[in-house]
Image (cartoon, rainbow, N blue to C red):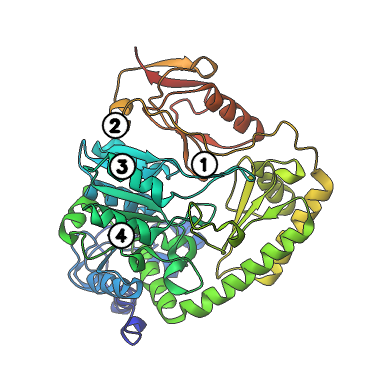
Amino acid sequence: MDLEQQKKAPVFEALETLKRMRVVPFDVPGHKRGRGNPELTEFLGQRALSVDVNSMKPLDNLCHPVSVIKEAEELAADAFGAEHAFFMVGGTTSAVQAMILAACRKNEKIILPRNVHRSAINALVLGGGVPVYVNPGTNKEYGIPLGMELAEVEKAIEQNPDAKAVLVNNPTYYGICSDLKGIVELAHRHGMLVLADEAHGTHFYFHDELPVSAMEAGADMAAVSMHKTGGSLTQSSLLLLGKNAPEGYVRQIINLTQTTSGSYLLLSSLDISRRNLALRGKQIFDRVLYLARDAREEVNKIGGYCAYGTELVNGRDVFAFDETKLSIYTRGIGLAGIEVYDILRDDYGIQIEFGDLGNILAIISVGDTELAIERLVSSLAEIRRRFSKSAEGMFDHEYITPDVVVRPQKAFYADTRVVALPEAAGLVSAEFVMCYPPGIPILAPGERITQEILSYIAYAKEKGCSLTGTQDIDLNTIHVIAD
C-alpha cells in the first residue's frame, strides 16, 4: 500500500472544489443545494445539502468512472489489497448480488452455506442460479450456526464438479470464520471462483490480530460493508475483485441494478473512510480490540451470560473468531436474546445490533468509548438481577437444516396458493421467512415447511422477533407452491 498516495481523497477533494466554484444549479436534485427544502436543510445542515449533487464532468460518473471516482476506486483497491474496487451505493446487498450474478448464470450451481444473508438467495431468485447448500456446523451449547468445514466443502465440490463458485461468510453475524484460505485453494484447484460476504469484515484488512481477509486469502470477489465497521455512511459499501474476476463484466452486472444517480454523500464517505483506515487503521483497531476484549471479560464476570470468543476456535467449523463481535448468550438468565435486546433499548436507552432467540450482538467499533462499554455491562448486570428466570422450555437452537425441494427462482415465480401458517406443514414455501436482523432466512422459496420450522416461527413471534419476507406482513398466512 502506497501511504503517500493514500493521503488523497479524490471524490471529497472534487466536491470541495465544486463548492468553491459557486456553480448555479439547473440540474437535479431539485432542492438546489438545500434552498428548495428549508426543513431538510435545517435537519441535515447546509454543508450536507450543498454536496448532495448529481453526476457532472468534474465529479465523474459512478456507472462509467473515468476521473475522480476511478482514482478513488483505485486507491480503495490499493488499501484493501485488491485488483479493483467498485464503490457501491446500494449497500452490501447490491455487492453480494453483483458477485453472485457475475459468477453464476441461470441453471448454474453455486456452493454456499445455508446461513447466508437473504441478499445471496435473492440473487439466485433474480439470476436463476442453483444453490448447493453446505450445512454449517452447530454449537450445541449456544445453539448458533458455525462456519463450513473444509471437508464438507470438498464433499460438495466432488458431488457438484460443474459448480461455478463457492460463497463463504467471512465472518458470520456471530463472528465465526471458516477456513477461507483452505476453501480458496480447494475451489481454485477445481476451477471455481470464491466469493466472500464480508459484510461484517471490513476491519480484517487493517489489523493482523484479526482473521484473514478475503483478498489476503486469495478470494476472487468480496462484498465489504464499509459502513458497518469502516466508518462510512449507511448504505455505502465496496465490491473488491481479485485477479481472476473480470472487471468489465462485473461492472456491467453492477450497472444492471445500481442507481445511475449515485449519492455523493455516500461516495465521499467511502473515499474519506478509506483514507482514514489506510492511514490509521492499525491504531483504530488496536483500540477496538482493547474495548471488545475488556467488554467480553466484564460481561463474563456477571454470571448467567456467556460472551463467547476465541475459545470456540477448533480448526474446523470455527477456524477463526472476530473478537470485535461482542456475541453474548442470554438463555443462561432465562431470557431470549430478543427480550434482552428490547429491554436494553426500552429500559436502558441502549441500542445493540440484534437479538435472536438465544443471543445478542453488540458491535464494538472506533466510535465506542470505555464509558459506553461500562454502561452496557452494568445494564446487563441489572437486567440479570431484575428479569432473570428459569430457562425451561426455551427454544435451544437458531439453525434448522432446510429441505430444498425446488430451486429458489422457480419457487418464487411459481403458481401459488395462500394457506394459514399453522396448516402449512409439509407444503413448499414460495416466500422467505426471516427474523430481521440478522436477515438469515428461516425459510427460503422452494424449501419444505416443517413442524419444527412452524414451532420456531411461533416461538420467535411470541418473543417479539421482527419476522419479515412474506406478503402477509403479520405472517398469519404464507404463499406455498400450488399443487
Question: What label sits on residue 409 in the rendered view?
Answer: 2
| Mark toward the viewer: 3 or 4 | 4
Q: CA distance from mark 2 to mark 4?
A: 30 Å
Q: Is residue 326 left or right of residue 249?
A: right
Question: What label sits on residue 123 in the rendered view?
Answer: 3
Q: Which residue is mark 4?
A: 185
Precedes in sequence: disc 3 or disc 1: 3
Q: Quick one: quadrant of the N terminus? A: bottom left
Q: Nearer the viewer, residue 138 or 415?
A: 138
Precedes in sequence: disc 3 or disc 4: 3
Q: Residues within 10 Å of mark 3 (few under 14, many from 20)?
A: many
| Mark toward the viewer: 2 or 1 | 2
Amino acid at the residue labelled 1: Tyr
* Residues at circles 2 and 4 in contact by the CB criterion of under 8 Å: no
Q: Position of residue 433 (x, y in %)?
A: 47, 32
Q: Residues within 10 Å of mark 2 (few under 14, many from 20)?
A: many
Q: Position of residue 270 (x, y in %)?
A: 38, 67
Task: Identify the secondary structure beneath mark 4.
Answer: helix
Q: CA distance from mark 3 to mark 1?
A: 18 Å
| Mark toward the viewer: 3 or 1 | 3
Q: Quadrant of residue 412?
A: top left
Precedes in sequence: disc 2 or disc 1: 2
Q: Position of residue 421 (x, y in %)?
A: 52, 19
Q: Is residue 83 left or right of residue 237?
A: left
Q: Which residue is mark 1?
A: 436
